[in-house]
Image: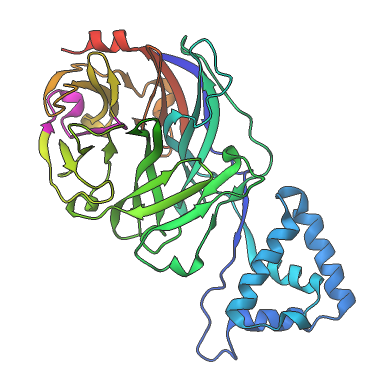
Amino acid sequence: MRILDERLHADPSRVVLRPFHLGWSSDTAQGSRPARLVADILALPHREAAEEYVRVLADFEERHWQTEQLFLERYSEVEERLCLDGDAIDTVRKKLIGAYFCHEYTYAAAALMNPSVVPHPDQSGMTGGAVRFVMSLRAVGEGHISSIVFREGIAHADGTFQLWPQSHFATAMGIDDTSLVDADSAVTVHRHAESSLSNSVIFPITEQQKGGLEDLRLVRFDHGAGDFEWVGTYTAYSGSSIRSELLRTRDFREFVLEPIEGRAGRNKGMALFPRKVNGRYCMVGRQDGKNLFLMYSDRLDCWDDDGVLLMEPKYPWEFVQIGNCGAPILTEAGWLLLTHGVGAMRKYALGCALLDRDDPSKVIARSRTPLLTAIDADRFGYVPNVVYTCGALKVGETLLVPYGISDSAVGFATTTIAEILQLME
């Protein structure tokens, strides 16, 4: 693989406004902390409240998109929860209350890693074999909470690419029905109409997700007759348990996050084939923590099959475990599956395998040596000696492979399908 110069790093300067939830209150306290805070704000003389709001706005207005509107939206949530009389509260105090119940969150301060990349829904204006793409990334922020962020760009058949710039502002996607936060069901989120995808963040919502949304493996799924849906499998971490879930969208404006039902959903690292195989949905996963399995299902959201053994560790660089690195990619030679292996000293490496296009349970060939390992400066980071990708993009006969570097940053590599096929035996 040819390593490109581009690197994406953690960035503590990128912040979003998030709800601030007051913590523990002693049993001897008079009333709830949120109610007492609101009472203190309402007790301020009008001039003092206005002066305090001016100070808040001077500190934060230039750091966020539609800051005052976000304060009002947060106030509305507080009003509903505390049963406040909105008619009796002036607009300045409403905004001030909203500000007290918000805080800045650095969603990518600790790490940016484990990307996947798919064709963009909008391919208008692309010439010369270029492909507009969407790349998802796992962003790790305060409290080591993982969220999902995106970057857009254009990839070319010669292996080069350009990322679209991000603006100064980032925004959190909103949930359509806040009553579902504590439910064990699907939830729908949407990005603000005036915010670009590259500046939008999907945060954990449900109780199962509260510890983080980890390692999204996106794929453009072909339902047939030109009907495409973008589907991603990810790990929802509660802080004590894991579950595989699906992200589904058709326009990257509205997203459905839903649990995967069935026995297979208790595992992580599942990757969906980009179309049905022999009339059924098909998935690759690591069901026993060490080996790769192939699973089939008649429903996209239910995988109650332990699957059949597909691949076991074979070479020293993968003796500890092997796993997939995103959705299989269809080539004329068969399904190209990028893999990762873990060897001595818990060092990660990327490999690959070729599966039969009609019967992907048949492994035609696999790489004896790694395609990519962590070397030199790429060995250092939050978790050293790791390279990891959640999906590559086929552009003509070239592969663009974004990859996580030691759970800290993201790098990019490129190769050709022919070169990869020559490495396998």
- Image-based side of 78 in relation to 213, left or right: right
Which residue is farthest right? 47
Callout count = 0
Q: Residue at x 55, y 18 (%)?
A: 126
Give coordinates of residue 23: x percent, y percent: 53, 73
Q: Nearer the viewer, residue 47 or 25?
A: 47
Give coordinates of residue 321: x percent, y percent: 19, 35
Residue 162 lies in the magenta stretch: no
Q: Is residue 45 among what the camera can see?
A: yes
Say if 23 sits above or below 342 in the image: below
Q: Residue at x 53, y 29 (%)?
A: 122
Quadrant location, the C terminus: top left
- Image-based side of 90 in relation to 226, left or right: right
Q: Residue at x 37, y 41 (%)?
A: 232
Q: Residue at x 46, y 37 (%)?
A: 136
Residue range in magenta is 310-327
Give coordinates of residue 371: x percent, y percent: 30, 18
Q: Nearer the viewer, residue 330 or 68?
A: 330
